[in-house]
Amino acid sequence: MKPLTRRTFLKSSLIAGAAATLAPYSRVLGANDDVRVAVVGFRSQGSNHIKWFGKIPGVRVVALCDVDKSFIDREVTKLKELNQKVDTYVDVRKLLQDKNIDAIITATPNHWHSLVTIWACQAGKDVYVEKPVSHNIWEGCKMVEAARKYGRIVQAGTQRRSDEGLAEAFEYIRQGNLGKILRARCYYFSPRGPIGKVNGPQPIPEGVDYDLWTGPASLEPLMRKNLHYDWHWQWLYGNGDLGNNGIHFLDVCRWALGYDSLAPRAISFGGEFLWDDDRQTPNTQVAYYDYEPAPIIFEMRNLPQKKGDSAMDLTYRRTRADTVIECEGGYFADSWVYDYDDKKIRQFVVSGGGSHHANFIKAVRSRKVGDLNADILEGHLSTALCHMGNISYRVGHTASPEEISQSTGSKKDLLDAFERASEHLSLHDVDLNKTPMTLGPWLTMDSGTEKFVGDYSNEANMYLSRNYRAPFTVPADI
């Protein structure tokens, strides 16, 4: 008998989870019952969730939870102006004991995503979890396992999955209207300045429970100017721009190409250039996912198009497209299908997926995993691609331009991406012979076990999980 690997378990449990018995404390929702939601973490995106979910008919925001009391006060004041009363919590563990909550919406920092989701599933609550769904690959697997075991509806915040225009465009491509799919490209060219540099531990902002903020991570002094948001660029809490925004575009590419497992191989290179700050993640990065028959190529830049200019580079064929699907007979970019003379063939109505929140509520009511446009399994796989790219980068070493060119092998599209990144940096007077990139190795993934094998696997597998700080431990036994 073929062994039941982690991957095959996840695939088989997709069906089983849809019919699973609801966990304790769940109530059966009638057609006219309000869905009562709590929002956990709302400095920025979570604040939007309070508004968005509050506007869906039949949904009530009944509780808020944040470790920063100033954010709680801010949102409570807003809701009071609308004559809405909510319960408030600082500790998510206390919120999860509230039996008057049906679903959790979480937009915490990345290192809290998995634990909030797993604990919520165990407490019998459905979950909408922001992207990237996990801080590492192992956590994502445990999130899927928890959703299935406890029969919960768990939606990933990759809202483009609810874009009907994209769905129509990808079906058009899969029907062969443009011939064979050759590759998928995704770009994230967005300005981000340095986060500053500190010379010692910084004071914790008043009203913040820093122990709770830190949660599963090791409790270390605050070594950046801003507690909030800039954690994205430190590995202990965030996943860089590949995890922060690249997840959206990688997810769209994987969706378009129909891949339902991790890439068999991946490589990444890049670095942090020009800045001397407390950021640890790259501000220029290329990641290549060696799927067959069509690879996915990711390119990220935080620097403007050239020295002394504030405008960002254009992307594919001098457009601002963030996702491009190249086929033999043409390509899809933005909302259009083009031929290779750049003549427009067909347009699709692309919305950005504004109905994603309503889609989650629909599935909460139906209790059908299949009603979700971005089930947690999809969120896990796309998030894990981000982790694969970052892991290659993190186990890499500085390398000359010649070494990086050689590492691309026969893959011209990867070499082209390196040359574009090199040219971009040269316009900022960066000499890669003097300030070299970090070149990550090719990493081979066993998609069945979701572990690396072969060269550099020992180093790479160390990043599959993390050391957790009790009592904020992601459970191995779900």
Image: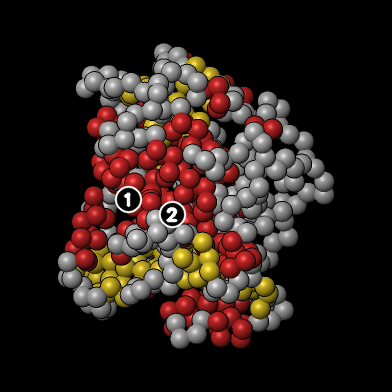
Which image quarter: residue 459? bottom right
Quarter in which the N terminus is drawn: bottom left
Secondary structure of the residue carrying tag 1 is helix
Q: Which residue is mark 1?
A: 12
Which image quarter: residue 356? top left
Q: Which residue is mark 2?
A: 6
Q: Earlier in the sequence, mark 2 or mark 1?
A: 2
Dots 2, 1 in contact, CB < 8 A:
no
Color encoding of the figure: secondary structure
In the image, residue 457 above or below residue 84: below
- Residue 200 in percent (x, y) is at 82, 46
What amino acid type should be assigned to the residue bearing mark 1? Ser
- Residue 60 in percent (x, y) is at 36, 21
- Residue 359 in percent (x, y) is at 29, 38
Q: Nearer the viewer, residue 82 or 109?
A: 109
In the image, residue 239 above or below residue 90: below
What amino acid type should be assigned to the residue bearing mark 2? Arg
